[in-house]
Amino acid sequence: MPPKRIDLHPTKLSRLLNGRDNPNNELVYRLEKHCGNVIPAIYWWKLYAKQLEDEIKTDERLRSIEWQKVKNNLKFRA
């Protein structure tokens, strides 16, 4: 899919394909149109969301780094 067909700069396409950038609403609408509405925009977005979900579940290094930045944890009673 050449970037010209969806008005996407080649650098942006490269960044998306290599996981250095994320799709925005405008891009998922373009992809929807480009594929003749066979794949709705929401499915393109869910594909990205699934990737993000996997990163959140598995990135223990980043979790550890971010947890160190939290002070005064909330306490809940059972």
Image (spheres, helix red, strand yellow):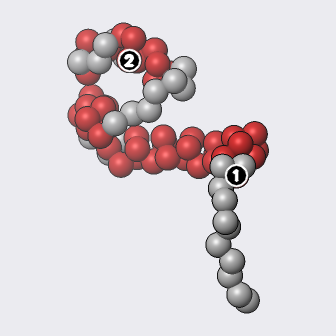
Under mark 2, the amino acid is: Lys
Q: Quadrant of the C terminus?
A: bottom right
Viewer-proximal residue among 71 and 30: 71
Mark 1 secondary-structure assignment: helix
Task: Residue 41: give x, y in percent of width and height.
Answer: 32, 43
Q: Earlier in the sequence, mark 2 or mark 1?
A: 2
Quadrant (top left, top right, bottom left, bottom right) of the N terminus = top left
Is residue 76 visible in the rendered image? The answer is yes
Residue 25 x %, y %: 29, 40
Front residue of 72 and 11: 72
Left or right, residue 19 beside residue 23 = right
Q: Could you tell me the amino acid type at mark 1?
A: Trp
Name which residue lies at 57% across and 41% down.
Answer: 51
Q: x, y percentage for residue 32?
A: 29, 37
The residue tagged 2 is 12
Residue 20: percent from left, percent from top: 51, 24
Callout count: 2
Q: Residues within 10 Å of mark 2 (few under 14, many from 20)?
A: some
Image mark for residue 67: 1
Q: From what the image shows, is residue 17 above or below residue 38?
A: above
The reply to whether callout 2 and callout 1 are in contact (CB within 8 Å) is no
* Residue at the image position 56 percent from the left and 43 percent from the top: 52
- Identify the image quadrant of residue 13: top left
Secondary structure of the residue carrying tag 2 is helix
| Residue drawn at x 71%, y 42% as measured from the top left | 65
Compared to residue 3, the image places residue 36 above or below, namely below
Viewer-nearest of labels 2 and 1?
1
- Cα–Cα span, label 2 and label 1: 32 Å
Characterize the local packing of mark 1: few (<14), some (14-19) or many (20 or more) Cα atoms within 10 angstroms.
few
